Amino acid sequence: MFDNIAYAMGTGGAQGGEGAGFQALIPLILMFVIFYFLLIRPQQKKVKKHREMLGNLKKDDKVITSGGIYGKVVNLSDTVVTIEVADRVRIKVSRVNVAELAQPVQAEIQAK
């Protein structure tokens, strides 16, 4: 008597086969969207901002290199930036290694 009920409940497996493939992709699509908005998009914005900063570099800008060296820009070319780190001490670094513009240190010291 109970065997017939089990067989009756088991039918209909072929009906959901077409929609099941799309439903399996939904979590993957959601994960990609989450990764895009949390990881990829902010990184692209950061790279774009850095490129703009490098394009706007000019003489006498105070900069920080990616190695942590503070200095003043004394010469620029397409790929190389010459930075003066002390009186008559100049170093050449790749333009992409300029990390950011330095904030005025004197204003920070006077504020304290």
Image (cartoon, rainbow, N blue to C red):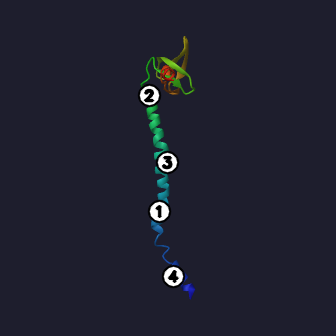
Q: Amino acid at mark 1?
A: Gln
Q: Amino acid at mark 2?
A: Met
Gap in Å between the C-alphas at discs 1 and 3? 20 Å
* Mark number displayed over residue 9: none
* Mark number displayed over residue 35: 3
Disc 3 crowd, CA 10 A, few/some/many (<14, 14-19, 20+): few
* Mark number displayed over residue 53: 2
**1 vs 3, front mark:** 3
> Label 1, on which residue?
23
Gap in Å between the C-alphas at discs 4 and 2? 70 Å
> Label 4, on which residue?
8
Tell me if 22 is positioned left or right of 67 in this view: left
Instruction: Assess whether mark 3 and mark 1 are in contact (beta carbons under 8 angstroms).
Output: no
- Say whether disc 1 or disc 3 marks the residue closer to the N-terminus: 1
Q: Secondary structure at mark 2?
A: helix
Q: Which residue does the image show at 46% across and 50% down from the upper left?
A: 33
Camera-side residue: 1 or 11? 1
Q: Count every numbered label the image shows and give the total.
A: 4
Camera-side residue: 15 or 51? 51
Disc 4 crowd, CA 10 A, few/some/many (<14, 14-19, 20+): few
- Say whether disc 4 or disc 2 marks the residue closer to the N-terminus: 4
Q: Secondary structure at mark 3?
A: helix
Q: Amino acid at mark 3?
A: Phe
